[in-house]
Amino acid sequence: MTPPTPTIPGFATDRVQVADGVALHVAHGGSGSPVVLLHGFPQTHLMWRHVATRLAEEHTVICPDLRGYGDSDKPVADAPDTYAKRVMAADVVALAAALGHERFALVGHDRGALVAIRAGLDHPDVVTHLASLDVLPTLDTWDILHGASAAVAWHLYLMAQPPGLPEQLIAASADAFFGSFLDAWVRDPAAIPDDVRGVYLRASREAVPSIVADYRASAGVDLEHDLADRAAGRTLRGPVSVLQQDWGAALGFDARSRWSAWAPDLVHATVDAGHFMAEEAPDVVVDAVRALLRRPPATA
C-alpha cells in the first residue's frame, strides 16, 4: 500500500488561475488577517507545514507552490521573463485577490523570498509586511560572490548558463543534484523526514526546466529589475524582518547593511539553524512572523 502524501494538517487545497495558462496549487487554512508563505528551493509549499498550522491559529494562511514548482503549472520559458520574479510576484498578488484578499503580509524563504521582495517593491499598496528567510536580494547576492568563496553558490552559475546543457546535466542525475542541497544545507536531517524528502525530490525532478529557468532569470531579468530599482532609489515601504544564517561572517559582507539599503524599517537577526529554518526551527520563525505582524503596516 502506498503511504499517503504528506499535507499541511487542517488545510484545504485548490488550484487557482493567476495568469493566462498558469494556475497555482495552493494550500490554505485558518482565519483572520492574511499571510502568504512562499517556499524555497528545492522544496514545495509543504516546507511550511509546521509554521503554517501555528500561524493559522490567528491568521488566514495561504501557501502556494510557486510557478514552475510542485503541483503548480510550469509554462515553457519561451521569453526571458517567463520566470522573472516580477511575473511570479504578480502570480502571488493575483492568487491572494482570487481568494478574497487585496492586501496581505508576505513571508518568503530562499527563492520564495526573492519573489516576496519583488512583490514588495512592485506592489507596495498590497504587501503590508514582509519577512525574508535566509537570502539576500538578487543584486546583493551577485555582488557579494567573489573568488573561491563563490563556490558555495556553484549552482547559481550552472543554472545561469544558456538553455540546454544545465537542464541536460541536472535531469541526468536529478535526485543526486537536488538531494545534495537537502543534505548540505540542513543541520538537523530529522527536520526533513523521508516522506517529505521524497515529495521534494519528486517535485524537483519533474520540474527541471522550470527550476533552471527560475534561476536563469535571476542572472538576467531579475538583476536588471533590481538595478533599475536601486538607480531609482526604490525601497520596501513597509516593515521588513529578515532571518539569516551568519553568511556575512562566512563570506565577508555586512548582511544587515545590505538589507538596510532596501528596507528602511528593518529588523534583522541571525539564526542558529540551517538553511531550512522553517523546518528546523519553526518556533523561531513563527515568533519572528508574529512580531513582524505587530508592527505598524505599510499604508495603502
Image (cartoon, grey):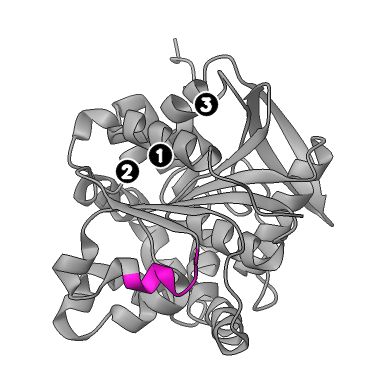
Residue pictured at 31% horizontal, 56% vertical: 177
Residue identifier under label 3:
55
Q: Quadrant of residue 81?
A: bottom right
Q: Amino acid at mark 2?
A: Phe
Q: Residue furthest bottom?
A: 231
Q: Nearer the viewer, mark 3 or mark 2?
A: 3
- Mark 2 Cα within 10 Å, few/some/many (few <14, many 20+)? many
Q: Quadrant of the C terminus?
A: bottom right
Residue identifier under label 2:
276
Q: Position of residue 108 (x, y in %)?
A: 50, 49
Q: Position of residue 42 (x, y in %)?
A: 41, 49
Residue pictured at 55% horizontal, 68% vertical: 213
Q: Amino acid at mark 1?
A: Ala
Q: Position of residue 245 (x, y in %)?
A: 25, 54
Indicate which disc, 3 or 2, sits on the residue closer to the N terminus: 3
Q: Nearer the viewer, mark 3 or mark 1?
A: 1
Indicate which disc, 2 or 1, sits on the residue closer to the N terminus: 2
Residue identifier under label 1:
288
Q: Is residue 232 magenta?
A: no
Q: Are marks 2 and 1 in contact (CB under 8 Å)?
A: no
Extent of the magenta region: 257-264
| Distance from the alpha carbon under mark 2 to that under mark 1 | 15 Å
- Mark 3 Cα within 10 Å, few/some/many (few <14, many 20+)? many
Q: Nearer the viewer, mark 2 or mark 1?
A: 1
Q: Is residue 261 magenta?
A: yes
| Distance from the alpha carbon under mark 3 to that under mark 2 | 18 Å
